[in-house]
């Protein structure tokens, strides 16, 4: 689930408490990321009209958003 940093009220019982993990993404650490990653939470090309219309060329940008590099950071 993606969300912003708004507050929430948790359950008092330990077995019902939420387990929140935050993922911090940074573009300036040298790992390859496709152009436009992180803009408006959707990967879009610079020539995008941002109308929200989906066509065959723009259906799934998430699949190409991250390219694994197993040697990164070693």
Image (cartoon, rainbow, N blue to C red):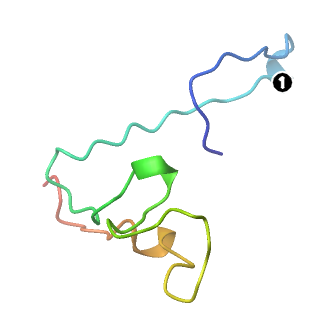
- Secondary structure of the residue carrying tag 1 is helix
Which of the 4 image quarters holds residue 43? Answer: bottom left
Q: Vertically, is 16 above or below 61?
A: above
In the image, what residue occupies the spot 79% across and 14% down? Answer: 9
- Camera-side residue: 23 or 12? 23
Picture quarter with the C terminus: bottom left
On the rendered structure, is 40 left or right of 54? left
- The residue lying furthest to the top in this view is 12
Q: Position of residue 6 (x, y in %)?
A: 63, 20
Q: Position of residue 41 (x, y in %)?
A: 50, 50
In the image, what residue occupies the spot 49% across and 58% down? Answer: 42
Which of the 4 image quarters holds residue 71? Answer: bottom left
Q: Vertically, is 49 above or below 55?
A: above
Q: Vertically, is 33 above or below 23?
A: below
Q: Vertically, is 12 above or below 21?
A: above
Picture quarter with the N terminus: top right
The residue to which callout 1 is attached is 15
- Camera-side residue: 36 or 11? 36
Q: Position of residue 14 (x, y in %)?
A: 80, 17
């Amino acid at each position: 689930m993606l969300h912003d940093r708004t507050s929430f009220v948790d359950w008092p019982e330990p077995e019902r408490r939420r387990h929140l993990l935050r993922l911090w993404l940074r573009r300036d650490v040298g790992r390859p990321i496709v152009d436009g990653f992180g803009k408006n939470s959707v990967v879009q090309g610079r020539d995008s009209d941002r109308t929200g219309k989906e066509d065959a060329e723009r259906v799934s940008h998430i699949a190409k958003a991250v390219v694994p590099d197993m040697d990164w950071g070693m």
